Structures are given as structure tokens and as C-alpha cells.
Amino acid sequence: MSQSRGYLDDNPELESALEWAERWYHIPVLLVLLGFMLWNRVRSWENFIVDGEVLFSGNDAWYHYRSTQYVVQNWPSTMPFDPWTAFPYGTSNGQFGTLFDQIIATVALIIGLGSPSDQTVAMTVLFAPAVFGTLVAIPTYLIGRRLGGRLGGVTAVTVMAFSTGWLLQRSLVGFSDHHVAEALFQVLGVLGVMVAVSVAARDKPIYEQFTERDIDALRDTISWSMLAGVAIAMYLWVWPPGVLLLGILGVFFLLRLCLEYVHDSSPEHTAIAGAITMATAAVVSASRINVLEITATAQSLLQPGLALAVCFGCVFMAWLARFMEQRKYGRYVYPAVVFGILASGAVLMALLTPSLWDFFTRNVTRVIGFTISETAGTVGEAAPLRGAGVLFEAHGFAVIVAAIGGIFLLTKQFLSDDAPAEELLVVVWALFILLAAFTQQRFAYYLAAPIAVLSGMVVGQFIHWFDFSADDGIEYYQVMTILTVLLVIVVPLFAFGTAPVEAGSTGPGPSIQGWDESLQWMEGNTPAEGAYGTGGDATLDYYGTYQKQDDFDYQQGQYGVLSWWDYGHWITTRGERVPNANPFQQGTDTAAPFLIAQNETRANSILNSTDEDDAKTRYVAVDWKMAETNGNLGGKFFAPPAFVDGVQTSDYYSRLYIQSQAGGVRQVTFQHQAYYETMVTRLYRFHGSAAEPQPIVIDWENKQTSQGVQYRGAPTNEQEPEGQQQGQVIRQFQSLELARQYVEQDATSQLGGYGDAPGERVPAMEHYRLVGSSETEAFPNSPQYQHSAWTKIFERVPGATIEGTGPANTTVQTAVQMRNPATNKTFIYRQRTQTDQNGNFEMTVPYSTTGYDDWGTDEGYTNVSVRAETQYQFSAVGTNNGNRTGFTGTTEVTEGQVIGEDDSAATVELEPVTIQQGNETSGESRAPVTEGVAEAGA
């Protein structure tokens, strides 16, 4: 009897308190941990209320809000089809409008007493991820307790509470995506199967009990197995692509049944639990089928089909085990036969149904095969983890402890004849989720639970080995051992993690706020869906119920808004307009080639190929990120080329690596001419105007690292011309001629490529005009962006025809100054054309100069905010009476002419202008209207 035991005998009250604490300590500890988890996730909620409105984080949260609103109005039905996205087809997306949205909608209905306001629904959606994220800890505790006792469960929750990884990020207030619900229901599914196989191991059900209808003996096995099947089906309801869990369970039952046979135990008991579980999952998931095909992105034949395949596999393996036992085959013949049958089946599938084989192999390698397509690489959550170090950053030493626990449990399965089946399930689950996370980092939020429960198991087993019990007394070395173990796991979470800071500083982010300004402008200043060209109210019901179809028939006056897919849900929910592309990556085959099209004709043909006769793409929305090539700044220009065959990012820009003053390496991108020819650049940077080359040169030097890697660096070893500093990457010259001379003499340099400076002239656009933008500027003082409104809205218009006369066979230039009231900045739209031998010319322009109030939303057109401050001013240089002379003229272009309501052409006649000569170098003139006239005067 230890000293502490004697002390307790002398103090019965202390002994009683210690016994009570040992029995019930986990409840207050768990409540504190759950309270911390919820507080840590919701404490920044006020950051998401901007000007009285709820703004969510990310993209998908906005569509979940839309899906939830639909369920609120049509409870419990989910949206079968949505024509408010993926113009001109509409969509039915199985990953939204699922159980996740139904649960949130139900809570909102309860809070709103059956009729919640939009604000109530938005607030419910806002807080939902934090609640789901906190609830994940409950099944995590139960799994940890099953593996390592109550202390193991408490340790598991502790690890989860203080981990700063992906589960925390996905469960913060405002990040209202289905990710955190996936984590919750997957853990519930795994817990259900653990209980089912454990009960089967205890009760040992066999086939004869079913034929004899021995319900009393089978009741627990059947009940728990059916509950496990329901839990799995609920996970699939939340996220149809979650068939990965069915694959994990299939591998688990395959390995476990083989191990049981090898260890001379009957696999029939586990097989019965597996068959009932998977049959239940198949039946329940089949009740939600809405696509009669095999696909992982919707509730289809795949989910119940795979569940039934695992069910039949369990039944077959149980029968095979009996068959081989009766004939007294060797222990290792059974797994050899099973794997041989699987291999033969795979070969037959590949030969007889190659498309089905390709479907499964493609999806398996995409999820756990460490492969990623070029297009998937443009999606942040589909990129692989950077390395194993990021796991330590998120979970501290718990990763190492969990790895030790996994190895211990796996070894135990092979060496022990009575190792529980549930332990193998946890190991298989953890291994597959680890593979998935290193293939796509989106699966990393699943890792929190396996790491937590395996850490809890190690701690629980460690304490069990030290025989920590109040009955035997408490030795100091035992206390120190327990504290050391807990500190090794928990302290690194504080030392290396950033849970409090990370959770407390979250908000909707600047992107949605920058976009929201322009989308609110769009909602109020563009025609409602169905009113384009006619005026009136919308003809497309925003929360209407539409039957599922492959190609929605949009009606007259309904239209699309083209942007990159990242922003589609914002356009739907904040602008209440129909985007061509969306975060389901639908419409990328239109958006990507349009955005990088090298001329306006090609861009228009892309839209015309998908537009309907009576419903067309009318607007284009672009932000600075779409035009930015530097990914380190948040640029997304790299994405569209990944979706277009025959092009790559190096066609548009290259990278330089220069030494910073702090001693690090800084990446600088510079653009090629092809970049400046793209539609997204011509819209965002130039507003459709022509752009002239500037005397700017990008200079570099080919260098090599110590490892032999070639790269472009600053020109530190070149002999520079007079007036140029050593090592400059961006060089400014007095004239284009000097800049071109420098490039001709230096092979490692190019003309233009910085900011708004192309290397060659970029022609003007004729059918796209800036009509509105956000007030927020991304780079208000940057030399790279003269006009950096976060988001800009362009309208696709027929354009106005201008007919004119001037000097024969010469270039005519026109310019008009426009003002954007959102940023209070002006820009000049420029265009040029050539006169014929008779001096006649014609051009099409997208901007009007007058008549704005005659055509607005009441008439079915845009309330244009970006308006002209001048008339169109024309200039040319020709001959007059044999002398080189400048010609000028002006004209107005009405809004009706630009939008096609007035077919008449604007006219202008260029007249010779008299240049008052001062001295030869003065350059004085009465009317210095344009560069062309100044040239004539000179």
C-alpha cells in the first residue's frame, strides 16, 4: 500500500471526492472544451455584419444560403433545378441542397417561428459551421473512449479543440460550406460501424439464427448495424461524393474478414454486421436518387450501388469461409482466393466495361492517387498538401503520437488473435484520409478526427499501463508521467498553432466586399432577368421551382453575365443575375476561352456559339485578380489557360527572381504581348480602348542556382548604356526609339510588359463598354494599375456607327474622355481607322456621349454610370492644297445608337485646322486637340 493510499485511508472525505472526480471528471472537462470550441469559432461573428447585412466567407457559402432559403420556402424539399446559374443551360448540382441545407433551414424555421426573415436565415447560416464544428467533438470523444477509455476520449477532444488546421478553418463562423458537416457525419458513420462490429463480435451472430428467426439473439446486432447504415447514408446525403467512405469500409471488411480467417476465427460475425450495415446504407441512400446514372457528384446509382457491392462482398466472403472450413483448406488459402477473385473481377471489368473501369480508376487516383489534373490545380482546395510539416503546424506532436498509435493498432491486428475489429477500422480510416489529404488538401479537415482519436488511444493505453487508480493510491511518478504525456501533446498546439488569433481575426474578406459594391450596382442599374430590351419586371422567379432538365429554355429578355467561375455564386446571390460560369466549374468551357481570346471577333463567336436566339450574354464582370499574373498577390490569370487546349501560362507572362534588400528572393512577373491582347486585359486595364506601347523595357539576365537550376534574374553583370543604372529590371527611356534600340542590342530584354504598357499597339474594342464598377480600389496608388476599381462591369452592345470624311488614304483617330463616378477617375477611349481613296471612313464605337436619360432600366437597358465628359474628337494628318495639314472634327453619339435602338449613324466631317506657328521649338497651337494635330503642326 503506497503512502498516498494510507493518506486517503485517514481522510475518507478526500477519498470520496477523488472517487467522484474519477467517475465524473470528464463531464465538466468536456463541457469546458466544447464551450471553448464554440467560442473560438464564433467570436468574430460581428466582422461578418457589414452595413447591417450578413456577408459570408468564400464562394460556396453563398449558394448554400440560396439553397437554404429555398428549403425554408419549400420545406423540406430541396431545389431540383436552378436556372439562376450556368447560363444558358441551368444546373442541378447534387452537392448543394442536401441534408446540410435542410438541417439549417429547419433550425431557421424554428427560430423564426415558422416564418423566418431573410436576416434570420442569413444569421442561422452564418453560425451553422461553428455549431457543426463543435458537434464533431462528441462522436470524436466516443471513438476516443472506445479506444482509450474516458481519458482517451477527453484527450481526443482536447487535441481537436486546440488544433489549428483545416477543420478549424472550415468550421469558423461565416465559412458556411458543407465541409464541416461532412466531417461530422463521416465521424458518426465510422462510430456507427465501430459499434456494429463490436456488438457482432460480442453476440457472434450466425446464418442459422436468421433461418430460425432467433430475434432476441440478433436484435442488438441488427439494430446497431442498421443505425450504422443510416449514419453512413446521412453522410452521403450531406455530400454525394463521399463514396470514399464506402471504399474505406470495403477495404476494412476485406482485410478484417481475411485476418479473422487467418487467426482461426469465424469471419461470419463481422460479415453479418457489414452486410446489414451496407444494405441499410444502400436502401436509405437510394431513397434520394435524382440521377439515373453513375456519377459521384450527385445522388445517383453510384452510392447505393457501391454500398450493395460491399454488402454482397461481405455475404460472399462469409459463405466462402464456411465452404473452405468444411474442406479444411489452409489458413492462407482463403485470402489468396479472395484477392485472386478481386483481381480477376478487375480484369473482366477493364475488358468488358472499359468506360466503367475508367470511371473508377480515374476517381480513385484523383482522390487517393497523388495525381492532379491541370484544371483541378487551379482550385485551391484540390491542390495537394505542401508536405508533412503542415500537419505538425496544425496538430503539433499529436501527429507523431497518432502515428505511433496507428502502428501499434495495426501491429496488434496481425500479431493478436483477439484484436478488436474496430481498431483496424480506425487505422484503415486514418490511412485512407491521409492519402486523400496529400492528394487534395480539401480532405485535410477529415484528418482532425483520426489524429485526435489515435492520440487519445495512446494516452489512454499509456495511463492504463501505469495502472493509474485511486484504489491503489497515487504515486508522484505516475502524476508526473501523466502530465508529461499531456504536455507533449497539448503544449505544441499552443506553441506552434494560432487558434485564438486565427479564429478571432476572420471576416468575409475584401473580395466579397469589393464585388458586392459592383453587384449591388448591377442589381439596381441593369434590367431584371427577362426585362432586357423590353423593360418591366423579372420573368425568372428567383426562388421558383423548376423541373430538372439538361438545357433550360431561357426566354426573351433573360441574359447571362460572364465572369470567371470563382464569382458565379456571388453574381447569383448578390447581383441576382445569371452567371455563365460558377464554382461548380460549369461554364469554364465558355468563360476561359473568352477571357483569353486574342481578338474581339473570336470572343464574340465564343459567346454566340452558346447564346440562344432570344437570350444572350449581355454583361462581363472582371476584377483585378482576373487580370493579375502574379499569383503571390492573389492573381488568377493563370487559371483560364489551364482550361484551354494549346495554350499555357508562359505564352502570357514570365517570372523574374530578384534579391530583396532583406536578403530574400522576390518574384516579379512581366507580361508578354499575348497577355495584353486578351479580352480580360483589354477590358480591365484599358476599358476597351486602344493602348499604345510605352518606352519601358523589361531587362533580365539568365542565371543559374548552385543546384544548376536556370532562372531569370536582375541584370547585375551586364554593361549598361549611359544613363541606366546597374541591375535595373524595369527601365524607362526617353522615347520608344531608344527603348527599341536597347532591346535590339540586348537579347535578354523586351519592350513593354510592365503594368499597362504593352510592347505593341493593342486595338480598340467596338462592342464592350464600362458601365459601372465598385468604389473600392485594389491598388489606388500603384503604377501598375492606373484604374484599379476592384470589380468592373462591362456591357456587350451592338455599338454605334460613325461615318465621316477626311483626307484620303490616311489614319483617322478619335478619342472621348469618360468619367467613372464610383472612383471619380477619368479615362480616354481611343480608336483609329483608315480613310479610303475618297476620304470616307467608318468605325463602330461602344461608348455614347449623350442621351443617357432616355434609356434606362424602365426601358430595358442599363442606367449607365460611366459617362462621357466630351464629344468624340477626331483628328487626322493629310494634305490640303499640297501642304501637310491637320484635320479635326467632333460628333455626338447617342445612347440609342450604341444599344441598337437607333439605327442611324453619327456623322462627322473633318476640317483642316490652322496651326499658328511660333518659333520652331515652341509647339504653340490654337487648338491642340490630339497627338495627330500636334504632329501636323510640328
Image: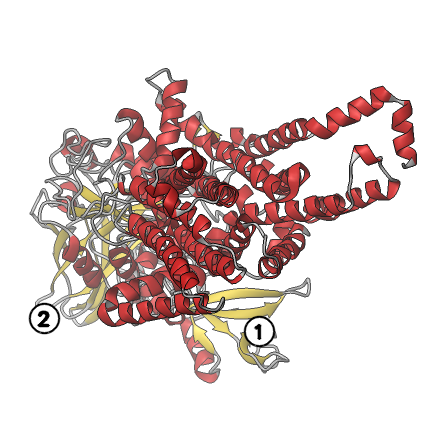
Q: Is residue 159 left or right of residue 107?
A: right
SS label for mark 2: loop
> Which quadrant would the N terminus be assigned to in this image?
top right
Residue highlighted by disc 1: 714
Of residues 906 and 300, the one drawn nearer to the viewer in this rendering: 300
Q: Nearer the viewer, residue 353 or 277?
A: 277
Q: Amino acid at mark 2?
A: Gln
Q: Which residue is mark 2?
A: 837
Q: Looking at the picture, tell me which residue is in the foreground, 74 or 200.
A: 200
Identify the image quadrant of the C terminus. Answer: bottom left
Circle nearer the N terminus (1, 2): 1
Residue 6, by quadrant, is: top right
Numbered badge on residue 230: none
Q: Say whether residue 825 is visible.
A: no
Image coordinates of residue 4 in percent, x first then y, are 89, 33
Q: Residue 498 appears at what percent x and percent y? A: 64, 44
Marks 2 and 1: in contact by CB < 8 Å?
A: no
Q: Position of residue 80 (x, y in %)?
A: 23, 38
Whole-number angstrom distance, CA of label 1 to CA of label 2: 51 Å
